[in-house]
Amino acid sequence: MKRLDIARIIIVCLISVGSFLLAQGVTFPGEPSQAPIGGLGWLAVLGGALAYKKLRNKKYDVVIHLAANAAIREALENPDAFWENNVVKSKPIFDYCRDNDIRCLYASSASVYEWWMNPYAISKKVNEIQAPPNSVGMRFFNVYAEKVSRPDMLYRMLEDKTATYLTRHKRDWIHVDDVVFAIATLIPTTYTGVIDVGTGNPVAVLDLAMKMGMGHLPIKEDTPGERDITCADTTELRKLGWMPTINILDTV
């Protein structure tokens, strides 16, 4: 079996296990200096720690670094934890890849386009600066999946009927399957730098809520730290042969 095929299997397995844990509502407490993180985030951080121990004495073709804390509202409440988890703990991985000339695909975020708005966005922007030259910062937009999104994410709250308000935002929702396809597309290429991972077709929160039977909720006008609209430029990914396959309005 080729190494690329093995890498793809590992990615799918990690996402499947993490999604299962999150779907079961499993959470794990962080260290006292860290914010608690959900099952998928904890799994990613644990996986990163275990992987780093093995990285030191081996040579790899590519490292895929997806571990992070990712909740904007939580970042506003506990910025130090986000700096520790997203920046400080990413540096050894980046240093290893730089020192051993290994290509690194890491999770960035669409939030970097207005990086000054919240601590999460700042942490992702700093990672783009400290990442090694032979790397790809994947600027994920609004990733979702049926029944396995984080409980604090809007899509999940609309699914579970736990949302208490709506906003006038428009979001570039991208299904996790399309994210996996994007990563698999990038692995065998020589692309470096940063790249948007989204659909390029933002959908209004109000339209999504109406489709999911939650359009009756009140609208909140003031949402600190959040952008009004997100929209990926998918030009570079499409040049590599990737294109989104799932429209969020077709999944509800």
Image: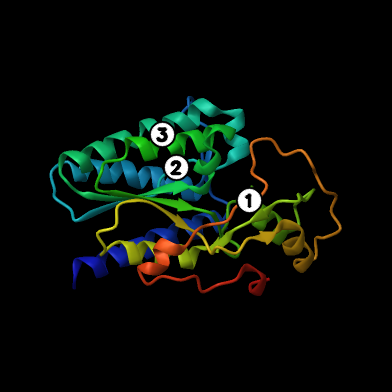
* Circle 3 or circle 1, nearest the eye: 3
Q: Residue at x 55, y 39 (%)?
A: 114
**Which mark is on residue 126?**
3
Q: Residue at x 75, y 53 (%)?
A: 162
Q: Label 1: few (<14), some or many (≥20) within 10 Å?
A: some
- Mark 1 sits on what residue? 153
Q: Position of residue 12 (x, y in %)?
A: 38, 65
- Mark 2 sits on what residue? 68
Amino acid under label 3?
A: Val
Amino acid under label 1?
A: Met
State which quarter of the image contains the C terminus. bottom right
Q: Residue at x 50, y 70 (%)?
A: 244
* Circle 3 or circle 2, nearest the eye: 3
As rendered, which of 217 and 169 lies closer to the eye? Answer: 169
Q: CA distance from mark 3 to mark 1?
A: 24 Å
Q: Label 3: few (<14), some or many (≥20) within 10 Å?
A: some
Say whether residue 20 is left or right of residue 74.
Answer: left
Q: CA distance from mark 1 to mark 2?
A: 15 Å
Element at label 3: helix
- The quarter holding residue 129 reads top left
Tell me which label, 3 or 1, sits earlier in the chain: 3
Q: Position of residue 110 (x, y in %)?
A: 51, 48
Q: Can residue 150 be seen in this snapshot?
A: yes
Tell me which label, 1 or 2, sits earlier in the chain: 2
Say whether residue 154 is left or right of residue 56.
Answer: right
Amino acid under label 2?
A: Ala
Q: Label 2: few (<14), some or many (≥20) within 10 Å?
A: many
